[in-house]
Image (cartoon, rainbow, N blue to C red):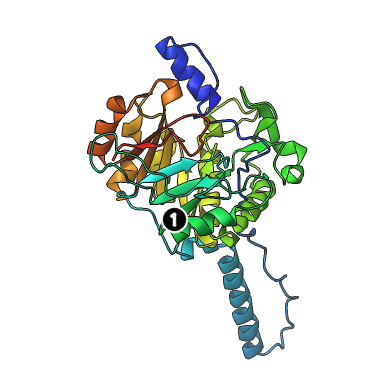
Amino acid sequence: MSAARFARCARMRGWPVTARARPRLGASSGVRSGAGGAGRCGRGRSRQTPGRCSMRLRTTERNLVAFVAALLATVAIAAPAADAASPSWRPVKADRWQYQLNPASSGAGTAGGITISPCGRPATGGPSCVKPTVYEIDLHGPDGRTPNAAAVQAVHGVGARAVCYVDAGTWERWRPDAAAYPASVKGADVDEWPGEKWLDVRDTAALLPIVEARVAQCARAGFDAVEFDNVDGWANSTGFPLTAAHQLRYNRSIAAVARKHGLAVGLKNDLDQVKDLVGNFDFAVNEQCGQFDECGLLKPFLDAGKPVVQIEYSDRGARTGGFCAQANAAGRSAVLKQLSLKATPWTPCR
């Protein structure tokens, strides 16, 4: 949830306005992923000089065929390659999610700072020990620079899947590719998060190559999917005149990039555009929809047979008794965490 959205909701409810839900990811953890879009459609071959009156008809026909072939090739290049690619795996509603963005675990049973196979008792009863089937972790490992292939390999080793967390909507000064962002795309500071700025998502020519570079890192590290965060700048004070249309164009572009690299793709928050984006994304991840009574906005994903992951935070006052029954009944995969987003506590609703 963005700071601005949290502040608005807090003021509406008379709560004190504090930091947003998304935990601070410092230099020790990576976030983001590049997204490179399909290249711009070129103008094709330059038109030939008109032939003389004596030019034979078959020559004209050959030129016409060549021109049409070049035009079709241009269109093919311009079309998002990602749309033609299908990820080899997509999450399902029955999956149980772990959400550890802070790679701070160490010792036995860990890999790349991630705890493998944590044991949790479902809040609504059932087995005394259940384990995640999907792990969402940061692109980078504990050093904040290296893709966390070690954790991905360990996750796969226990028969689970790994989702790559990528921040596609803000610039963070501690990221290894921070210098790749031109000053022109860096906007207003993100409230409560020093060193983080909103991005001008209208400038896809500048941003998509950076996003694609990160997505490519996710793919090379073996991740099965990618989830993009902070893709709701249009609803926040970014310093740019962003519109809903700008955000939709950007979000669809980065989703296409994920597909291009064979990864399933998840939408983070951006509740007001869910109905417009459900066809472009394979799953949705939301923070605190239970706390703010907004989970109903995610129904289009469930209606489309796509999973919804719900994260609530105990240090924001959430308790499993207040949201788990509703989440289970609706078919959402919900979990109670703390804002630190370490391995534990981890309390799945089912």
| Location of residue 189 (image quadrant) | top right
Q: Nearer the viewer, residue 49 or 259?
A: 259
239 with respect to 342 (left or right): right
- In this rendering, position of residue 189 left or right of residue 324: right
Rendered location of residue 148, percent (x, y):
60, 52
Q: Is residue 297 left or right of residue 209?
A: left
Number of numbered callouts drawn: 1
Q: Nearest the camera: 57 or 235?
A: 235
Identify the residue at horizontal 29%, vertical 34% (top origin). 123
Q: From this viewpoint, which residue is outermost toward the top? A: 14
Closer-to-camera residue (199/328): 328
Q: Residue at x 61, y 40 (%)?
A: 201
Q: Secondary structure at mark 1?
A: strand
Quarter of the image that includes the C terminus = top left
The residue lying at 69 percent from left, 42 percent from top is 175
Where's residue 271, x and y in %?
42, 34
Mark 1 is on which residue type? Answer: Arg
Query: Residue 281, can we see it?
Result: no
Q: Position of residue 43 (x, y in %)?
A: 67, 63
Q: Residues within 10 Å of mark 1 (few under 14, many from 20)?
A: many
Judging by the rendered image, the residue that carries numbered circle 1 is 161
Figure check: 246 above or below 36:
above
Q: Is residue 40 left or right of residue 255?
A: right
**Does the image show residue 38?**
yes
**Which residue is the extreme one toward the front?**
108
The location of residue 36, given as percent across then percent down, is 62, 55
